[in-house]
Image: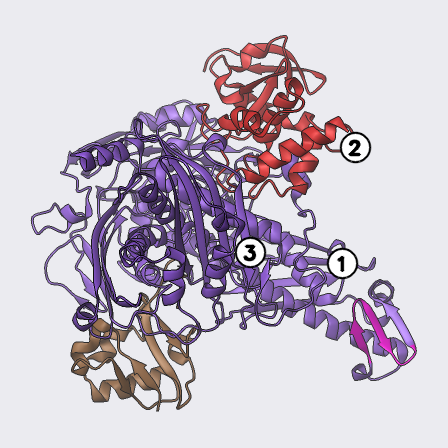
Amino acid sequence: MPVVWIPALLRPLTGGQARVQAAGATVQAVIVSLEAQYPGLQARLITDGQLRPELAVVVDGQTSPLKLRQPLTDASEVHFVIAMSGGAGP
Amino acid sequence: MTTADKPTEFKVLGSTPLRQDGVDKVTGRAQYGADIRLPGMLYGAVLRSPHAHARIKAIDTRAAEAYPGVRAVVTAQDLPELESKVADLGEGSMNLRYQSNNILARDKVLYFGHAVAAVAAVNAHAAEAAAALIQVEYEVLPPVLDVRQAMRPDAPILLAELRTDELGQKGEQPTNVAAHYLDEAGDLEQGFREADVVVEREFTTAMVHQGYIEPQNATALVTADGQVTIWCSTQGAFGVREQTAEILRLPVSKIRVIPMEIGGGFGGKIGVYLEPLAVLLSRKSGHRPVKLTMSRRDVLAATGPTSGSYIKVKMGANRAGQITAAQATLIYEAGAYPGSPVGSAMGVIFAPYRIPNARVEGYDVVVNKPRTAAYRAPGGTNAAFASETVVDELAEKLGLDPLAFRLQNGVQEGDRRVNGVAYKRIGLLEVLRAAQSSAHYQTPLAGPNRGRGVAAGYWGNYGGKSSASASVNADGTVSLQEGSVDIGGSRTALAMQLAETLGLPIEAVRAAVADTDAVGETEGTYGSRTTFATGWAVYEVGQQLKTQLCERAARLWNVAAEQVQYAAGVFTSGEQRLTFAELAAQLDRLGGPVVASAAVQPKTWGPGFAAHIVDVEVDPETGKVQVLRYTAVQDAGKAVYPNYVASQMQGGAAQGIGWALNEEYVYDAQGRLLNANWLDYRMLVTLDLPMLETVIVEVPNPGHPFGVRGVGEVPIVPPAAAVANALYRAVGVRMAELPMAPGRLVAALQARQG
Amino acid sequence: MSAMTHVQTTLNGEAVEFLCEPRQSLLEVLRETLGLTGAKEGCNNGNCGACNVLIDGALVNACLVLAVEVQGRTLTTIEGIAPPGGLHPLQRQFLEHAALQCGFCTPGFIVAAKALLDRTPRPSELEVRQWLAGNLCRCTGYDRIVRAVLAAAEEAQT
């Protein structure tokens, strides 16, 4: 199952856990299963059906232009990080 | 040049051809935005706010409209009123309403120089005279000019609807704090308990400007059928198209943006200022072309700048020399509207080091100063000034050489950043070792009031969308059309990558920057992305051309395409042999023109690291600092066009030294900018600098066909810290404020003497 | 609008006449009236040198000179630096040394450097730095510019 690193500001929603496992073949699917485990997370990551504009999603060390549609493997590591101006990620 | 990993043999990459736009630029022929002159062209002027914070009660434009020669006057009433929607414009997100209000203030002016109205007239003098006749009734409000003051609960509020955002959770009270961010790793308290030495310092840095020599300019023509053409100075033509379309509620297909040559940008020419105004004025003046140019005063007062900041850093290390914990709070000025680079700054601040326990917190705070814009590694210089001086102090307290201490704690592949992301192959350790063995570091510095400082820096770089197309000419050359504006030799660096791909000499490829109707979408020249991402698009174009040309050769030889090989400019199949030029001459008889295009959106850009070394001499009586020697060391991945890579390193270093020693916005208590000219906003001149030595390290980026990493931004990250560390070694004071101007240095020396 | 003044001058070796308002700067007339856009406006108050031109061989900021002042004088702009069919050694060395990035300040630097080499054919590095201290470049850190001027001086000697 992909491992999701929870942004520090959202850790109150995961009982303080910084890393959790969540099933899903895409970032979107993983967020849906996160929501089932930790209600309220989805609304903090997604707005109007899109990843929040202030966030970038990093999968296996690389910022994904596909964002929510980025495919994942069982070994994937997913980070939601602050999107950086002028390009400074990940 | 130092090369790590497996070296690759290149023929064109790494060479130093003359740049293809060079002759035009040394003879004065190159056409920059303000050089354009169209039949029937009108000239514009913009009226700007004399107040830092005021409500607009009424605007009377009648006298301006009646002024001889005036053809149009516009105010915010001529702009569509946009909802407060955050749009992902590819160039980063921006709130459209704020963007529109920054073009022309609607209900409030939020900074000295905020645009209020614009005029088009038959010449610039008439436009300026008419603009001065516009009567604006203001209700002046108290300004907020300092981030910590702006965060107080009783501070005047700039934007009534603003609530602090914490990843989607909004605060309940009106505030000037637009956003609060947090990254955490490990157990901070435990980390500090493990430390034998702890250093905690506070820093402030002043707002500074990008300082491009060419002022903003835009010329627009709206024809009777509603088609819009814009000629302007921009880092990204597609970004201008997108922003103008959003602000004016036009379809992008109605707008063609022709990027003229650009006289510097450094991040300050990504967002639009004049383009929508020129369009409005052209439409309102009966479809005449309208040119708007900023004065230097306008440029300094109302464009750019980058954030001033307050930063607190605490770091601890054990006797073995390992960093055990690090903590930072970064408060950045956003200017009038949200959007400071504090997020990037958080990503920079401890990036070079393995830190098991860390906490980094950031605040984006609006103040009555111009809306900030990107400036080369946005937020990075402030952040590194703070963290790299603390790292220096830790090394000193542990009795360790500052480069050795950095090497001991330096990150490499697999190490995690504070936000948890693991690094891919990076070149920090190679850079630090190259700095250690540089001629500069190996040469002792002697003499009173002299000192040597070092600092490291990180920038993440960027990928983004890029497009290119190319056609094969009958004379055996290739014409390349690419979407990236050329600010510092990128046309040639891109032509070199196509030549390398095709096995041709650079002379056989000619590159041109295309407008928005002539090439696929391409993000701007920012994020150190052009040679990386547009270079990748160009590589893909080259691969396609090779495939198509092999098919043509196969047709000529009556063999299967797979039986044709191509290498070093020659097609072969068995005994058959044709050069690229010989085949190109026969294309008409083999199926017609050969053209290819490609678009990419890569995600495998690699971060760049730098280490800078500086020797300074201080005059303790006057506080003047002379830079005696400077060396910049940087990992370029693969240095495609080495002269221009080195020039980026030198230019970034020079900007950073200016930021360190001289540059700052000076406001009075009412928020009026007191130094909106280059006499009083003093940028470095020839006499302020020595030659700037460069050491290019090449640790290929595994995520690029040629191993390229971006190079443009990281060189501005270390200089301020390196200079501060050198000052300490020279005269024994740790400076905590930028700029470290003579007066401040003298005051610090006097304070130390008690 | 004020009345126009008739001005006769020698511009890049050719006799030129123009009409201008007394308030117009030489820079404005060069760019807007005469179509010579090689001199650039960076600041319009003499701080940046991007509009450097020569009047009777003397280096000036065209933004600080009124156009009416050039009556009867000899003007050289960046457009008049190169010999027919070629490049001036300074122009060639600026290219060879990659002494420009954006190129906007380049015409001013080349005109200024020409004025230096015309009076001091073999300047030291310090003399080059002193002479060019009135020209701002934000891209290069000046290293390559200074080297290009020194190389052009050497080239002119050989």
**Disc 2 designates what residue?**
C85
Task: Choose mark 2 or mark 3, whichever is in front.
Answer: 3
How far apart in space, not on screen, are marks 1 and 2 (Cα)? 25 Å
**In the image, which lettered chain appears red?**
C
Identify which residue is drawn at 59% across, 10% down.
C6
| Chain letter belonging to callout 2 | C
Secondary structure under tag 3 reads strand
Q: What's the colour of chain B in the image?
A: purple
In the rendered image, residue C106, in percent from the top left (x then y), is placed at: 58, 35
For this view, does B681 lie left or right of residue B328?
A: right
Q: Amino acid at mark 2?
A: Gly
In the rendered image, residue B417, in percent from the top left (x then y), is placed at: 34, 70
Labels 2 & 3 near each other (Cβ < 8 A): no
Within-10-Å neighbours for mark 1: few <14, some 14–19, many 20+: some
**Up/down of B282 relative to B713, above or below:** above
Front one among C72 and C135:
C135
